[in-house]
Amino acid sequence: MLTDIQTYFRDLAATSPQWNFIWLYDDVQMGRVLTGLWMTIKLSVFCLIFSVLIGILGAWAQGARSRLLRGLVEGYVQFFRNTPPLLQLLFFYFALGQFTPKYSPDGWLEVPMISNVGWAIISLSFFAGAFNIEIFRAGVESVPNSTREAAESLGMTRLQTYTNVVFPLALRISMPALSANLINLVKTTNQAFAIAVPELLYQSVSIWNDFPSAQKPTMLMLLVCYLGLVGVLSLGMGRWERKLRIPGYGA
Amino acid sequence: MTQWTAEQPIVSIRDVHKSYGQVEVLRGISMDIMKGEVICIIGPSGSGKSTLIRCINALNDIQAGSIQVEGQEVHDAKLDKLALRRKVGMVFQQYNLFPHKTALQNVMMAPIKVLRENPAEVEARARALLKKVRLEGKENHYPGELSGGQQQRVAIARSLAMRPDVMLFDEVTAALDPETVKEVLVTIKDLAADGMTCILVTHEMGFAREVADHIYFTDRGVIVEHGAPAEFFTNAQDPRTRAFLDQVL
């Protein structure tokens, strides 16, 4: 079955050189696609987790009493929201990357502590995290003050009130905007291409540089892969949103 | 500070002043409430009733005067608010239940999270409390699935689950339909009969007359008149009290 398909596409490449689906029958190219896809998934998962954590902590800090802390969070949000993510990535990698300490695993080569993959995760997490803070903040602000007072009158501390009452309610309100931002994040991971992170786009471009006849099929494959990834994410978010729905609450 | 004993007032309010910006809401309020007493505070809106009751569990701060609960100064910067709020339960006009938790979970949350009690014990107590407020069978309903009166009774059970010594009721029937007011009032009456110290801000004159040991009438931030219900409702001295009672009775 699999060999039949591979034979078909090998023949197709021979008869129509424009349509060389090389990664379907060439194991090396297939390996490049799969490692690229895996790297994109890893980037996405790490950035999703970190950016949501940044969002939760940032939204909490924005309600803090310390004016300094609130100011810092506000500055961070403004900076990362109002500059292009690609520029942030380049800045993190080339500018900040110069100052990161190096270490030598084999005694000869000097390797920076944070790799290009590390910088991609940091930079993209900070980028999406800034939006998540604003998203969660809108959710937190929509929780009525009277609900907070009820929790306080029961003796809960500010942290207990936040984790048990305010955040669970804010999350439900934030879900649609959060989904949209996380979907954007997954699509933005391919900008890591610019600092040579071997993710799906990087591997694809490498393939069509080596085999120009594979360019069109590889582009199609890229689109299909991203459609699939984002599809899985938005399906998951939709399911989570439905699971969080409270009977008799909200629309 | 001398040790508080049950012969002393459980809540003692002395010459309390409170302003919101330029507006002085409380202008020297004093009252003493003994353990087991039921106190109703009545008066026109804007007279500072709700503000006063919110000051008792430190949801509002005060500018001058003193409020003591069981001998402990409420508006002391060093006060452990958590310890105070364990002693003082509060029920609000808008119920303020946690909408993402069922009736049972609403009642169980604070004892488990704040008092760190054993969840199984808390659950047994919560079920008993819901039964006591006549909500058996509604344990797994979310607040959005309950009527206003039912939600308010969950809120009362939620407060009681912390085993408070004093209960504050801030116009708890003001947002309810007339036919559900009664079920909430019956619940409060049961509580009062059990010996709970209750401080109510209310517009239910019939109820105040029936259950209160003492009635305070406030207007423009001061106590105009106070007395036992029979005396207060039939023989009010101050013209402001009489004018108010003429309007509401």
Image (cartoon, coloured by chain):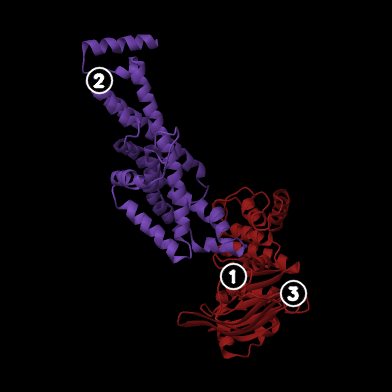
Q: Would you say A160 lies left or right of B36 here?
A: left
Question: What residue do we see at 31% from left, 38% from top?
Answer: A195
Image quadrant where one finds the N terminus of chain B: bottom right
In this structure image, what is the colour of chain A?
A: purple
Task: Find disc 1 in the rendering and name its residue.
Answer: B170
Labels 2 and 1 in the same subunit: no
What chain letter is assigned to the residue under label 3?
B
Which mark identifies residue B35?
3
Chain painted red? B
* Figure check: B90 above or below B126: below
- Residue B155, given in percent of the width and then of the height, sits at 62, 60
| Quarter of the figure with residue B150 | bottom right
Q: According to the image, label 2 marks what residue?
A: A211
Tell us which disc is closer to us: 2 or 3. Answer: 2
Q: Amino acid at mark 2?
A: Phe
C-alpha gap between disc 1 and disc 3: 19 Å
Nearer to me, B139 or B181: B139
Q: Nearer the viewer, mark 2 or mark 1?
A: 2
Using the image, name the chain to which the residue with label 1 belongs: B
Task: Chain letter for mark 2, please.
Answer: A
Q: CA distance from mark 2 to mark 3?
A: 89 Å
